[in-house]
């Protein structure tokens, strides 16, 4: 079993880039675009406990902001278990992290993110 603890430095700028874009779009009222960047950050960070938990925290705050009970409850559950699952390497690869998707569902990684992941030490 492989333990994932530290995000590779080559992957961090891509992960952070997604998280920088999201709140700007939220402030502009572009909710769908904002959410898309949180999902992309989730895909990039889901293998790493701190980054995985941080994205779910951001998603929880988003859910509160838009007053979505479903998203808030879904993110609380994911906050409790997501980081642990990352640490032991049992995340559902490609899962976008929202409450609209079952937490254990594997999903196809968007091509551009797959390229980023494959070109870093995130393999």
Image (cartoon, grey):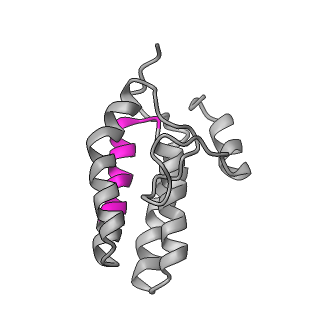
In this rendering, position of residue 86 left or right of residue 57? right
Above or below 83: residue 73: below
In this rendering, position of residue 108 left or right of residue 25? right
Is residue 119 at least partly visible in the picture?
Answer: no
Q: Position of residue 32 (x, y in %)?
A: 53, 75
Give the main secondary structure, helix, strand or loop, of the magenta stretch.
Answer: helix
Above or below 121: residue 79: below
| Residue lying at the far top of the rendered structure | 1
Is residue 47 at least partly visible in the picture?
Answer: yes
Q: How many marks?
A: 0
Above or below 90: residue 114: below
75 or 11: nearer the eye? Answer: 75
> Where is residue 75, by image quadrant?
bottom left
Q: Position of residue 20 (x, y in %)?
A: 44, 65
Kindly identify the residue that appears in the image at 73 percent across and 49 percent down.
Answer: 111
Kindly identify the residue that appears in the image at 65 percent across and 44 percent down.
Answer: 116
29 or 10: nearer the eye? Answer: 29
Above or below 51: residue 91: above
Kindly identify the residue that appears in the image at 29 percent across and 63 percent down.
Answer: 72
Q: Position of residue 76 (x, y in %)?
A: 27, 53
On the rendered image, what quadrant is the C terminus found in?
Answer: top right
| Residue lying at the far bottom of the rendered structure | 28
Residue 56 in magenta?
yes
Residue 100 in magenta?
no
In this rendering, position of residue 15 left or right of residue 5? right
Residues shaded magenta: 47-60
Kindly identify the residue that appears in the image at 66 percent across and 46 percent down.
Answer: 109
Q: Position of residue 95 (x, y in %)?
A: 54, 47
């Amino acid at each position: 079993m492989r333990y994932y603890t530290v995000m590779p430095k080559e992957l961090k700028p891509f992960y952070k880039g997604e998280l920088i874009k999201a709140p700007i779009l939220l402030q502009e009222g572009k909710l769908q675009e904002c959410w898309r960047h949180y999902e992309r950050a989730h895909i990039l960070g889901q293998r790493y406990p701190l980054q995985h938990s941080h994205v779910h925290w951001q998603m929880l705050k988003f859910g509160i902001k838009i007053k979505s009970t479903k998203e808030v409850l879904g993110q609380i559950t994911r906050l409790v278990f997501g980081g642990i699952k990352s640490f032991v390497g049992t995340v559902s690869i490609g899962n976008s992290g929202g409450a609209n998707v079952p937490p254990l569902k594997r999903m196809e990684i968007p091509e551009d993110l797959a390229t980023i992941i494959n070109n870093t030490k995130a393999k």
